[in-house]
Image: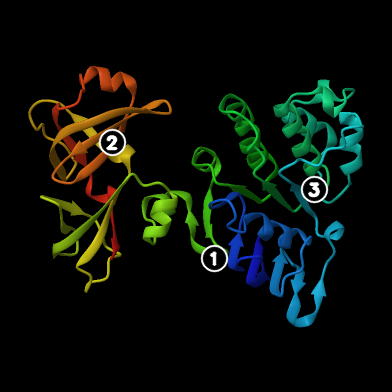
């Protein structure tokens, strides 16, 4: 069931939250730094905060229309909400927490026993919330939200308190909920790993403003502004100058190098640009410059090597600073060390140009 939100205005302490967006089936990640207004936006959708102005429609039902003084209270919105603190009752058993939220509704696919089975919490029913693990509490909170027969599910940083191994255990349950119950989900996070693991669509929110929204791969590969590129931690952002352009390719000069980019969306009168390259889109090869489908073959020198999570960050000099991410195995096979010479390959579609 689609959510339509238009002309939202909500006064916050240091800025005004302004948003217009549409949420369809699947998981829409609301992404941005802490304090961007993400939780406040969820609260407005859930009916927990009244905006200065807004039109909110869920399927055929208008939930907010300040122009006509329409306001549907939270219990009647058919929205499931899992807040950051989960809001489970610690003095009750898991079963009583679930029964508290259970509500029969039109969604027969959200049966009590099916939800228990999908989230694998059948064996927890008799235990108190204080007696189960953090990952189990997350699943219980998800189950309780689903048992309200929601038409929309709001998840406010549900995995923020979990370490990576626990996140890896919980993420498949969220994907399962999306695939089995077909309930639109708005998922708030500032974690890129969670975003890339789950999102079908992405909304970037900064200081109360929606800077970009769209399919996940489109937003990550083609950020609309330097601010979005920085928030999405694109590792290489360098100033460049367009030297030629045709329908197929744009040639841009960055430092001492020339790069071929597929930049069909770049305005024709723009000459000064930011060159954006994601580190995972850089391929490193040793030895002679072998034939490749990549347009850009850049002679490179390794400036530094550092571990970054499960990968190795390779800082290169290609006539401009370039960052690559490779596996430890690839780093070993290439015998990379400071001062090593090699070739960096970058395909033209993987170079994104933002007007300066």
Q: Which residue is mark 2?
A: 324
Quarter-of-image position of residue 310: top left
Residue 345 lies, in percent from the top left, at 19, 38
- In the rendered image, the vertical position of residue 233 relative to residue 131, given as above or below: below
Front residue of this view, candidates 153 and 242: 242
Disc 3: CA contacts within 10 A as few (<14), some (14-19) or many (>=20): some
Looking at the image, residue 121 sits to the left or right of residue 229; the answer is right
The secondary structure type at the circle numbered 3 is loop
Q: Nearer the viewer, mark 3 or mark 1?
A: 1
The CA distance from mark 2 to mark 3 is 47 Å
Looking at the image, residue 257 sits to the left or right of residue 115; the answer is left
| Sequence-earlier tag: 2 or 3 | 3
Looking at the image, residue 2 sits to the left or right of residue 164; the answer is right
Proximity of marks 3 and 1: CB atoms separated by less than 8 Å: no
Q: Nearer the viewer, mark 2 or mark 3?
A: 2
Q: Which residue is mark 1?
A: 209
């Amino acid at each position: 069931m689609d959510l339509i939100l238009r002309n939202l205005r909500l006064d916050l302490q240091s800025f005004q939250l302004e948003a217009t967006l549409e949420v369809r089936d699947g998981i829409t990640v609301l992404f941005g730094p802490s304090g961007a207004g993400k939780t406040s936006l969820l609260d407005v959708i859930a009916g927990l905060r009244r905006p200065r102005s807004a039109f909110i429609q869920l399927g055929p039902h208008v939930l907010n229309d300040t122009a006509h003084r329409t306001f549907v209270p939270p219990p009647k919105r058919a929205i499931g909400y899992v807040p950051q603190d989960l809001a489970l009752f610690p003095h009750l058993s898991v079963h009583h927490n679930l029964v508290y939220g259970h509500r029969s509704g039109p969604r027969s696919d959200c049966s009590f026993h099916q939800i228990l089975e999908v989230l694998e919490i059948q064996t927890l029913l008799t235990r108190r919330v204080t007696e189960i693990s953090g990952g189990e509490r997350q699943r219980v909170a998800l189950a309780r939200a689903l048992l309200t027969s929601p038409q929309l599910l709001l998840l406010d940083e549900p995995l923020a308190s979990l370490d990576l191994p626990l996140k890896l255990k919980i993420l498949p349950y969220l994907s399962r909920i999306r695939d089995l119950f077909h309930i639109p989900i708005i998922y708030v996070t500032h974690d890129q790993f969670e975003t890339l693991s789950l999102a079908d669509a992405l909304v970037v929110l900064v200081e109360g403003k929606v800077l970009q929204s769209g399919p996940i791969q489109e937003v990550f590969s083609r950020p609309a502004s330097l601010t979005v590129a920085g928030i999405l931690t694109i590792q290489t952002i360098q100033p460049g100058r367009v030297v030629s352009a045709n329908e197929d390719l744009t040639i841009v000069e960055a430092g001492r190098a020339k790069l071929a980019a597929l930049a069909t969306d770049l305005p024709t009168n723009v000459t000064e640009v930011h060159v954006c390259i994601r580190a995972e889109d850089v391929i490193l090869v040793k030895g002679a410059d072998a034939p490749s489908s990549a347009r850009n073959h850049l002679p490179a020198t390794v400036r530094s090597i550092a571990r970054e999570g499960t990968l190795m960050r390779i800082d290169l000099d290609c006539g401009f600073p370039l960052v690559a991410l490779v596996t430890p195995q690839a780093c070993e096979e290439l015998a990379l060390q400071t001062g090593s010479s090699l070739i960096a390959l970058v395909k033209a579609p993987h170079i994104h140009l933002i007007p300066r």
